[in-house]
Amino acid sequence: MKLAFATTFNGQDIAKWSGTPFHMAQAFLQQGATVEYIGQLKKRLPPFFKIKQFWKQLACAQRDSPRFNIIAAKYYSEQVSKQLESLTVDAIIAPQINPVAYLNSKKPLILWTDGLYSSLVGFYPGFSSHSASTIEQGNIITRECLSRCRLALFSSDWAARTALEIYGTDKEKVKVVPFGANLQIQNTLNDIRTMLASRSRKTVKLLFLGKHWDRKGGDIVFRVTQALHAMGQPVELHFVGCLPPPGMAIPDFIHCYGFISKRTPEGIAQITKLLRESHFLFVPSRAEAYGIVFCEANAYGLPCLTSFVGGISTVVKDHINGMTFALDANPQVFCDYIIHLMQHYTQYEELALSAFHEFETRLNWQVAIKEVSRLIQEL
């Protein structure tokens, strides 16, 4: 199968979009497909866009987003169309709407993404101040893309429902195919059993991996960890990705690492060590379209403690590979769940093995690509 892989940026850059496009394309390559990258597209905006953007921000505290602009989207699609002229491909894959929203091609267009514009407005902090013009254009661009797709694939049921209920997309082309883990992982069941045997049965080790303190629920993680300690439960929190607000007191059982890069062998080794030794990944996000980090945790037999928002419930299934909680859940609710599993360690081990099973059967790129390849071949 010969595929064109269309992004606005360089799809071969592992740093873009948490590495998801990179690993998606690599998985196609690993399963024998030929991938032609189309990316690094130039941006074209309307005349005086930046002046109008500045004025609207100043006068109305609203933002005109260049990302959701019809002129920019049309220019992206023109560039993709031009590059396609010199390529022979069977289909076009796009993890973004922007580069293909106005693409007219005889070859099947497949969108495979984690969220649509209307579900992100008012949900993600960066979408909270969009102007009326941006909201209108964002929805128009999304509809244009969905109308041109032969397949509209989404990583979660939440995103798929948006396509069906908000944009009225033909249900025959809407499918849910979860993303995989953005790490090169080759763990076996025996490896997981070895990890479980080495994990402490006394001190519960919690791991937070996230770049955004508020959106990822860093404050919730701190409160729960401190509550566990106050209840007499030995606990360690390893906090990776961001740092607490300045001036916040950090007790000695909380270890803050800041950002650790997955682009270096040293960074990967450090994150892998934390995944192997921890009991739970604890990321109670306030907004999350999907959550690749949950897939990565499951790959190490690490159950996930998180929140029931956005697309998370497609990844984390209660009592199967973790537990989802209400955003307003009292810290005691988290504590009771964690302490129960530590006191009934056999149940914890069963949950950890079940989490790894979810990774092996559902939450890895190889499984995902096989399903997408099958859907493409059926077109």
Image (cartoon, grey):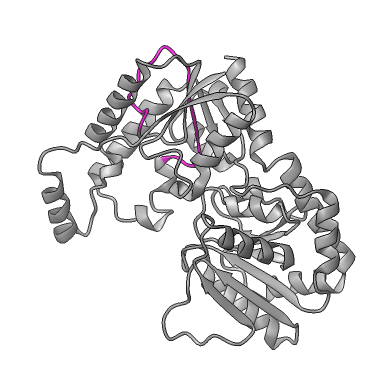
Residue drawn at (43%, 78%), measured in percent from left and top? 245
Q: With 160 as the anchor, is 181 left or right in this view? A: right
Q: With 49 as the anchor, is 139 left or right in this view? A: right
Outermost residue to the top: 106
Q: Image quarter for residue 146?
A: top left
Residue drawn at (55%, 48%), measured in percent from left and top? 290
Residue 176 location, x and y as percent?
A: 60, 34
Residue drawn at (64%, 28%), measured in percent from left and top? 31
Q: With 355 as the anchor, is 161 left or right in this view? A: left
Is residue 105 highlighted in magenta? Answer: yes
Residue 196 location, x and y as percent?
A: 82, 63
Residue 351 location, x and y as percent?
A: 81, 57
Is residue 26 highlighted in magenta? Answer: no
Looking at the rendering, the stretch of residues picked out in magenta corresponds to: 99-116
Residue drawn at (58%, 47%), measured in percent from left and top? 182
Relative vertical location of residue 138 with respect to residue 231 in this rendering, above or below = above
Placement of the C terminus among the 4 image quadrants:
top right
Helix, strand or loop: magenta stretch = loop
Regarding residue 93, the answer to whether it shows in the image is yes
Query: How many labels sit on residues?
Result: 0
Relative vertical location of residue 108 with respect to residue 95 in this rendering, above or below = above
Placement of the N terminus among the 4 image quadrants:
top right
Residue 81 location, x and y as percent?
A: 33, 20
Regarding residue 348, the answer to whether it shows in the image is no
Q: 178 and 9: which one is in front?
A: 9
